[in-house]
Amino acid sequence: MIQVSHESERENLYSPSMAAEFGSTGGSRESIDEDPGEGGLGIRRNCTKLSIQLERSPYTQHELCDSFDYRVKESTGYVERTRSAARHRLKRCAECRPKEALFARLPILKWLPNYEYRRDFVPDMIAGVTVAVMHIPQGMAYSMLAGMPAVNGLYMALFPVLTYILFCNSRHNSMGTFAVVMLMTGILADQLLAKHGEYSEETKTGYTHVQVATIIAFSVGFWQLLMSFLRLGTLSVLLSDVLISGFTTGAAVHVFTSQLTGLFGLRLSESQEFPKILRTHYNVVANLFESNVVAVIVSAATMGAMAINNEIIKPRLAKKCPVPVPIELIAVVSGTLLSYYMQLHEKYKLPIIETVPTGLPPAITPPLELMKEALSGSVIIAVVAYTTSYSLERMFAKHHNYESDPNQELFAQGMANVVGSFFSCAPVAASMSRSLVQQTVGGATQISNVVSCGILIFILLFMGSYVEPLPICILSSIIVVSLKGMFAQFGDLVVAWRSSKLDAFIWLATFVSVVGVDIDFGLAVGVCVSLVTLLWRNQRAYACTLGEIPNTGIYVDLQRYAAAEEIHNVKIFHYGAGLHFANRDYFREELVNLTGLDPVKWHEQALKKIKKEGRSLDRALKRAAEVAALEELKSQKKSRFWSCCLNKPPKDHNNHAINNKHSEISPSVSQEESQNGSSNKDSSIDMSKAGEHLAAAMSGVHLRKMSVHFDTNGNPLPFRHLVIDLSGVSFIDMSGVKLLRALLQDYEKINVQVLFAGPTEPVLHMFRKMAFTSDISTDYFFPTVNDAVVCSRFKIVGMKGRTICESKLTILAESDAANVV
């Protein structure tokens, strides 16, 4: 029975919800003053705090199940579950209509007929133009990371994007070139070219960078489609935010290193020997005096102008206009015009793009003979591209309240990469910068990307030749400036270090592996370190001893709450993780350390105490017998002396004569006494071994209650009841059940009663499967910690025939139950 009482002086101005908001316990009254409204009238409300009084009988887990119709969920075998899943799939396929299946795979058929032209078309147009302006410089610059011509970056912003629009659920993702993915593609392409040879005009053999990049895109699409069909969309959980931050920051170092030659106008081949980054930096420094001075000046001017815009102009302009200044496009146009009219390439040997084909590329099949070797390296690119893209989709979907499907996102990206591989495209992914701009300027649907693709088609058909004089150093400057956001992720390391040293370790391990070794190796190291730290955290779970906040029935950590009090003769141990083979030893160590009692050691000390006390008793009895025998012998000698010397019969203490006949000691009597003495000696020897026999007999069995209440130093047993709180244990395996069974046996030997409180349903299910509840009485399992504590304090654990009326306890604030021992 739950009673809620409250009082108020003005009931018409009082509501229980108001009391619940401003109070929790007790009966004190608080006043709430409201500011005067438009009429100038203030209202004063007197509210009281809610007081909850709970009266019920303590339940065991068995009583709770019987009283409230508990039903055990029927468990089926693996074969039966497989058959049921297959039948369910077949039933869905039979009931599925072709139209619904088509709409599920082509979401554009759902939202395009319902497109709000009046509301969304103008914002989508603005967003499309803005994104197209960003695609031109970024696509041309990032394609260089993969070793491809600059124009291929524009192809990647066209064919894969149009395919992605048909199959995606996202409304704001801007697909195309992405620095990390392009860099990983370039590294894998270099490895394949080193093995199979680069294309030669003389021999007409080998492969070009574009051909290798297209087979990598095809392989990435293959992996993404396969993961979509296997419904592995949740694979992204393996890549935590900390891991992604360390990985992208390390990749940014690789990107920056690859652009040093472009910034200084050098023509150096990238080193493939370990360590690649250090060797590349060494080569750049060694050839620094051979740099193109014009390239250095143009790079510095471009980066300076972009930095001023990003740090000063852009933040101020964003308050007045959502459309950002297209500084990258301005840099490309200005650099092209400057290079063309000043003839920088002809006069100063400034490296430029040189050739940009006009028109759209023909559809060419990728070199499928390289797919077998490309599959192993492309799986990491597929995971990274999907993870970054889906994280953006999930963020935008949550912000704009629409659905996101991870498996459909995998399918959309896979189709985009497969189709793009036939049109000279490398793997694509969503760009955070373009996606955020598209959403900021008002883009509502993928129509904005359709507009962007239209602009790019116009540029490819009619304006390709105009960008041929564009200096490469300007594209390198655009890439380097865009890396600022990635390098800013060093702040994530500081935040991780303050919050969790393990997260900081994941960040550092991933970053160092990516920078020191390679990108794909660094990602694998980051995943492995994340799994190891996850296992370590599970092994080192939160454990504590609980105490009660007086008169509340609330049990909290004793080390964190000063007001909490420990229950007399009761220890409550809480563990906050699954109990399995990997952390069972840690569970026992924490239990012993926090409770301050090792049952095995206490049992051994009790046996030593009994053995020691037995030996002391034997020695005392033996000494007393020897003293008594000596006194008797002295008395007999004295009597014979007086009878022989005085020739008188000896007298006793009452002055009565003693017959000499009886006083004489016959040989038979002496022989009998000697035999008795020997028997007494033998018995004393047997008694000296009594302690050893007793200790040996008591090992492995229950000791008597009074035998274990004190250790060898006289210290009393710290508690008589141990409550193990299982409410934080989500699962338990066979090793965990065996551990609990062993703990029960150890504590029973020293007469400590072990109770289990709050077991979850998976834990109870495992107990039933392992016959744990059959070996132990069901009276030792309780639904809550409070039930176990109440039954322990009032000594009603395991009482037979206990009725609700007999066991009913009223816990009141003014109760003196705390004084009950």
Image (tube, grey):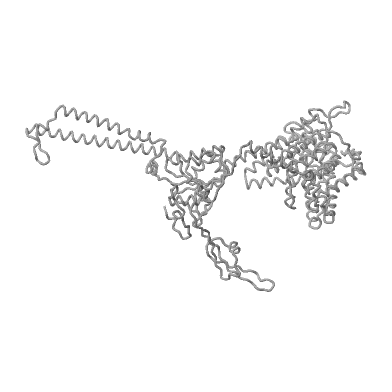
Say if residue 261 shows up in the picture.
no
Residue in the picture at 69% in, 38% down: 86
Q: Position of residue 659 (x, y in %)?
A: 9, 34
Q: Position of residue 693 (x, y in %)?
A: 35, 33
- Say whether residue 434 is left or right of residue 703: right
Q: Position of residue 211 (x, y in %)?
A: 83, 33
Could you say which quadrant of the image residue 636 lies in? top left
In the orientation shown, which residue stands out farthest toward the left?
Answer: 647
Say if residue 213 shows up in the picture.
yes
Considering depth in this image, is 235 or 647 the residue closer to the camera? 235
In the orientation shown, which residue stands out farthest toward the top?
Answer: 203
Considering depth in this image, is 531 or 78 the residue closer to the camera? 78
Q: How many marks?
A: 0
Is the residue 454 above or below the residue 281 in the image?
below
Residue in the picture at 73% in, 52% down: 399
Is the residue 482 above or below the residue 189 in the image?
below
Q: Position of residue 609 (x, y in %)?
A: 37, 39
Considering depth in this image, is 79 or 453 the residue closer to the camera? 79
- Say whether residue 683 is left or right of residue 439: left
Considering depth in this image, is 515 or 817 the residue closer to the camera? 817
- Say whether residue 560 is left or right of residue 100: left
